[in-house]
């Protein structure tokens, strides 16, 4: 019994009215402290709120969500466009690695080895950046995927094998004799580290239908790519899970509207002849099957009935609001994928401000997807494996100290002039380094500066004066006299003669 209840029980025999007022006040205080969403009643009836772990939730619906996502991408134009745009924006022409090391020789050798590997056929068919694309697509539609590393003729970690989520045996679940456990096909050791993945030898849905029995594969050669949304989550769920039902409903609504439009164009004339008249004196009914019941409509149809039959005219009416409702639902879907105008191609109600606001929000999502999913789970492990291979094959452990920075795809501006001017102001004011701006475009700053120096030397040697040369002219076309720039000797001689 609470302390307040004890006080009320002691007061009630001597001052019942006071005790009653205390009860009313305490009841009101309790009601004020209660969360509406936590209440159990009519409003929350049917709201399932289980206290399950992330693994329990994923295991119950992972396969169905994965298969449903693939079906949407195959048959729903909005899902197909949204996923393709997400992949294009997340990976684009590739998230490239720029390697660094205090020793320039080590850095150059490491970069050359990585570039050779990344631009080659890493899985026997495509390069590393195509592998990035397929990985990004798999985690969006399926929820997760695997990369298995195999040796080639020159050493370990020479070949990447991409595996869809189907390869991981979801039925493997239980405790191990050594104190470890297996969750959804992922085996953990006693310390909590991943030790193995239970994989089928072939895809369970392959044409040959010979998946076989899953066997454990050492976790040291597997990179598991997925987005973690909760602590302790072993696998991931399809990113389309929150919008799948809406996308299906939109498709059904479009089919209904499309059928309605067809029916509205199918209204014809239904003529009933007078009693005793077998047909119209102006037309002939020859060739008509009078015994067949017409159950479909076609545009411009004229149907004559038998004498005495009663016919009600079908006149479908317009239903307004369907287009606006579909647009509103697609806007809600696009908030979880890519901006509305990118997914639908509809810019009829957009302007510069709205497009820029949409892209700024989308860029925040891209940062999350690139920096917290693709780079740490897919690209960074690949670089570490290749540097470990370099250290092994050369015997130089300095390759293990190579660091990587990542150049993400160039983000297209809504208005390049305004956006580049804003970036220029950041660089001039010291808020942003020129090297960082170049790195964001996948350009190595040091190589780029050398190329600029070589180009400027060639321009000066030829005595050229270009309007695009910032050493000579400002962006307004005014001479840069304050810089002390010396023109080529030919120009100086001409000025002296003048």
Image (spheres, rainbow, N blue to C red):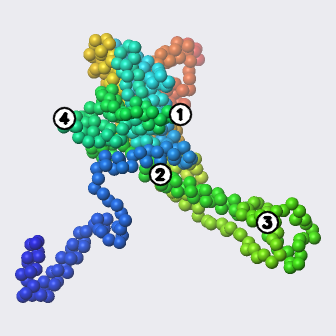
| Mark found first going from the N terminus, 1 or 2 | 2
Q: State yes or no: discs 1 and 2 in contact (Cβ < 8 Å).
A: no
Of badges 2 and 4, nearer the viewer stands 4
Q: State yes or no: discs 3 and 2 in contact (Cβ < 8 Å).
A: no
| Mark found first going from the N terminus, 3 or 1 | 3
Give x and y (percent) for residue 165. Answer: 40, 38
Question: Relative to 448, is 376 on the left or the right?
Answer: left
Dot label at residue 244: 2
Q: In this rendering, is residue 33 above or below 96?
A: below
Of badges 3 and 2, nearer the viewer stands 3
Other residues around mark 1 within 10 Å, as few (<14) / some (14–19) / many (≥20): few
Q: State yes or no: discs 2 and 4 in contact (Cβ < 8 Å).
A: no
Q: Residue, x 35% and y 68% (percent of image)?
A: 45
Q: Residue, x 51% and y 53% (percent of image)?
A: 247
Q: Spatial distance from mark 2 to mark 4, Cα to Cα?
A: 41 Å
Q: Spatial distance from mark 4 to mark 1, Cα to Cα?
A: 74 Å
Name the quadrant of the C terminus.
Answer: top right
Q: Secondary structure at mark 3?
A: loop
User: Residue furthest toward the right?
Assistant: 281
Q: Which residue is mark 3?
A: 291
Give x and y (percent) for residue 20. Answer: 16, 84
Q: Secondary structure at mark 2?
A: helix
Other residues around mark 4 within 10 Å, as few (<14) / some (14–19) / many (≥20): few
């Amino acid at each position: 019994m609470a302390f307040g209840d004890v006080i009320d029980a002691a007061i009630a025999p001597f001052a019942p009215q006071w005790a009653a007022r205390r009860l009313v006040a305490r009841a009101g205080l309790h009601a004020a402290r209660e969360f509406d969403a936590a209440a159990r009643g009519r409003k929350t009836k049917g709201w399932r709120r289980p206290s399950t772990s992330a693994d329990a939730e994923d295991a119950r619906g992972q396969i169905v969500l994965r298969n449903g996502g693939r079906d949407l991408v195959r048959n729903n134009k909005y899902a197909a466009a949204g996923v393709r745009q997400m992949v294009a924006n997340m990976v684009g022409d590739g998230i490239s690695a720029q390697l660094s090391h205090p020793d320039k020789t080590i850095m150059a050798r490491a970069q050359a080895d990585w570039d050779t590997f990344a631009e080659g056929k890493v899985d026997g068919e495509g390069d590393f950046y195509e592998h990035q694309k397929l990985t990004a697509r798999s985690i969006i539609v399926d929820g997760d995927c695997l990369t298995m590393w195999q040796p080639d003729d020159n050493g370990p970690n020479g070949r990447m094998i991409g595996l869809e989520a189907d390869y991981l045996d979801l039925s493997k679940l239980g405790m191990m004799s050594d104190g470890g456990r297996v969750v959804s096909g992922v085996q953990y050791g006693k310390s909590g580290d991943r030790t193995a993945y239970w994989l089928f030898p072939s895809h369970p849905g392959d044409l040959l239908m010979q998946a076989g029995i899953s066997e454990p594969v050492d976790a040291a050669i597997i990179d598991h790519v997925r987005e973690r949304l909760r602590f302790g989550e072993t696998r991931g769920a399809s990113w389309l899970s929150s919008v799948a039902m809406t996308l299906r409903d939109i498709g059904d609504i479009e089919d209904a509207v499309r059928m309605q439009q067809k029916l509205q164009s199918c209204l014809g004339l239904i003529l009933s002849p007078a009693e005793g008249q077998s047909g119209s004196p102006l037309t002939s009914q020859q060739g008509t099957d009078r015994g067949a019941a017409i159950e479909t409509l076609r545009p411009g149809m004229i149907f004559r009935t038998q004498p005495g039959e009663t016919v009600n005219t079908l006149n479908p009416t317009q239903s307004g609001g369907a287009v606006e409702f579909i647009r509103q639902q697609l806007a809600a879907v696009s908030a979880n994928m890519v901006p509305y105008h990118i997914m639908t191609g509809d810019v009829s109600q957009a302007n510069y401000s709205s497009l820029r606001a949409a892209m700024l929000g989308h860029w925040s999502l891209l940062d999350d997807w690139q920096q917290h999913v693709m780079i740490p789970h897919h690209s960074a492990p690949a670089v570490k494996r290749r540097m470990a291979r370099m250290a092994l094959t050369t015997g130089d452990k300095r390759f293990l100290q190579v660091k990587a920075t990542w150049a993400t795809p160039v983000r297209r501006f809504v208005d390049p002039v305004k956006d580049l001017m804003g970036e220029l102001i950041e660089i001039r004011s010291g808020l942003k380094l020129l090297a960082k701006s170049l790195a964001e475009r996948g350009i190595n700053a040091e190589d780029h500066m050398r190329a600029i120096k070589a180009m400027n030397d060639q321009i000066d040697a030829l005595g050229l004066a270009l309007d695009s040369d910032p050493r000579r002219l400002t962006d307004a076309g005014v001479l840069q006299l304050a810089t002390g720039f010396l023109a080529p000797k030919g120009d100086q001689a001409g000025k002296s003669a003048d």
